[in-house]
Image (cartoon, grey):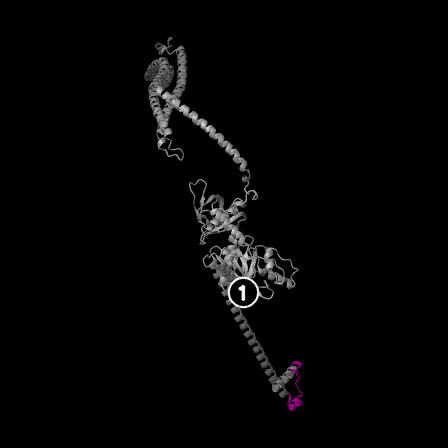
Amino acid sequence: MPGIDKLPIEETLEDSPQTRSLLGVFEEDATAISSYMNQLYQAMRRIYDAQNELSAATHLTSKLLKEYEKQRFPLGGDDEVMSSTLQQFSKVIDELSSCHAVLSTQLADAMMFPITQFKERDLKEILTLKEVFQIASNDHDAAINRYSRLSKKRENDKVKYEVTEDVYTSRKKQHQTMMHYFCALNTLQYKKKIALLEPLLGYMQAQISFFKMGSENLNNQLEEFLTNIGTSVQNVRREMDSDVETMQQTIEDLEVASDPLYVPDPDPTKFPVNRNLTRKAGYLNARNKTGLVSSTWDRQFYFTQGGNLMSQARGDVAGGLAMDIDNCSVMAVDCEDRRYCFQITSFDGKKSSILQAESKKDHEEWICTINNISKQIYLSENPEEIAARVNQSALEAVTPSPSFQQRHESLRPAGQSRPPTARTSSSGSLGSESSSLAALSLDSLVAPDTPIQFDIISPVCEDQSGQAKASGQGGRRTNPFGESGGGIKSETEDSILHQLFIVRFLGSMEVKSDDNPDVVYETMRQILAARAIHNIFRMTESHLLVTCDCLKLIDPQTQVTRLTFPLPSVVLYATHQENKRLFGFVLRTSGGRSESNLSSVCYIFESNNEGEKICDSVGLAKQIALHAELDRRASEKQKEMERVKEKQQKELSKQKQIEKDLEEQSRLIAASSRPNQASSEGQFVVLSSSQSEESDLGEEGKKRESEA
């Protein structure tokens, strides 16, 4: 190793420019050493930190491998071969973790400690001595300047002594500081080489020790174990490649087969509706009310399980009970201008839910499936076969007539031609005796050959239109939306009672009797049986307004009056004995099936569990109307009596006036009969024309009284 350059300590007292120039070279060298050693320190610090992280990560890996057998994986958690293999790996990695920990300790002692000492102690010492030397040099220069300014003419021993003492002290301090500073700079040349070589030596020795420990732990037995594991990995990879190829082929086949199903509403001719299902699953939109008039729709997965309808949100492990659909009712409804909506109502009417299907096929299949489950067909051994047989027998038993044309044909006079209509009956599977009894009961309540009307058509509207034509108003253009003109005041604005209910029209039939509630019950049975058998589930929702004058069906969206039933024509109303959501009333109208007789039509509705309230409201309206009529008649009678009394008063006052006029006339006649007074004074009385007329009237009145 070549010789080391040194600063001459002997020349520190002289402090020549050459010495200061050489000192500057050593200071630059010290600055360069400090910068380089800081970079080297950072690099070695990264090695040490990485080794510590590697040791901790290796230990954590070994710990996790040991805990594998304690994990409860949903799939493949009981693989004993995998558990034993990972336990073996855990032992080997745990030994390697110990080796890494020992290496970290050796690096800390043999590599990081020497370079840290040089950086924190030796380099900082050089910086400190440099600052002290700079201060001492400045103090010495200042003392020399003061000494040089001593006056030659005015010498002051005291001042001279102080300045001389100051020069002595500062020069001594500068000399001592400079000597120590030079010594530290000279020593730094040696420490620099030690600080560079000693950490590298410690690093290499630590690595050699680590590799020796690794060679002792990784023996031939471990190499055989690793070879077996490598073979197993290759077998698993080949199995995976084969399985992936099979799945890819399956995906291609499914893409070709499922292409028509990507359309949200597939063609019903290619995918016919299966009406015999007793189980179904799929996504539906559920309507949730968030306020009085606002609502939200949530998409959830629904499926049937026995007699229950289950719902399951995306991400849930299992589904929850949405509704018990045993003996429930299901129907298609119009809701918020959405397609394919249907409503399910529980058997007690306390719970209902509105759902929306994605396609027409799903819409009909859901309704048919829930209808089949409601009949408890799923409890049989072959539910789909029984459902098919029941639906087929129902189609053969009944044929409803829900069209406009059939309804108008039924309202024509008996003399006109009318196409034959089938009469609904739900007792097709009974014996001949029960069939004849049911027919007899139906004939006593329902008119023969009566079709069921599922559309909202009122005979009242037809009668009103006929009366309008008869009264010469046929030329006036009728508003097709049922809205009255802006200048006509609504008839119900002055009504005392205004109650609004949400109802759905089920159907109507012409009945023979209107004095027995059994008429309403039998009509309900007929209409519900026809709807259930023929899967006629769509119903129109309306607002039923009950007033003291009439019942009105109002469109909930446009507020247009669909039908008006005069309250006096409502002669009978009742609620279903078991299902309180169902109610109906009988309307007596003229010009029905026969021109000369009155006809009675029974209208059936479904409400939101408010059937009894609606009937009570109708009864209250009729009572109020009755009392109002009685009050009106009493008021008219009172007014008539007052008019008679007033007339009598006028005649009496007129008679009194006539008597008064007669008395006045008599007095005037008596005054005019005095001749003396008239001749002496030459005065006479002249009667005015009015008085003469009154006198004539008075005489005529007397004659009439005498004649009477």
The residue nearer to you, when weighing 534 against 360, is 534
As displayed, is residue 671 above or below residue 74?
A: below
Farthest residue to the top: give it: 2
155 to the left or right of 615 = left
Q: Is residue 671 left or right of residue 79?
A: right
Q: Position of residue 549 (x, y in %)?
A: 54, 63
Quadrant of res 662: bottom right
Which is more toward the observer, 97 or 261?
261
User: Above or below — where is 197 with respect to 457?
Assistant: above
Q: What residue is shown with label 1?
A: 568
Question: Can you tell which quarter of the image residue 465 is in?
Answer: bottom right
Question: In percent of the image, x 39 and y 24: which residue is there?
Answer: 229
Residue 497 visible here = no
Let me know if residue 675 is in the magenta part.
yes
State the count of labels. Answer: 1
Quadrant where the N terminus sits is top left
Q: Is residue 188 above or below residue 472?
A: above
**Residue 90 is covered by the magenta coloring:** no
Mark 1 residue crowding within 10 angstroms, few (<14) / some (14–19) / many (20+): some
Q: Please state the horizontal and vertical placement of residue 280, each as a whole percent of the image.
A: 48, 44
- The local secondary structure at tag 1 comes to helix
Q: Amino acid at mark 1?
A: Pro
**Where's residue 559, x and y in %?**
55, 55
Residue 87 visible to an observer of this rendering: yes
Magenta span of residues? 672-692
Most foreground residue, 459 or 257: 257
Residue lying furthest front = 432
> Does 176 sit left or right of 478 as displayed?
left
Image quarter of the C terminus: bottom right
Q: Position of residue 383 (x, y in %)?
A: 47, 47
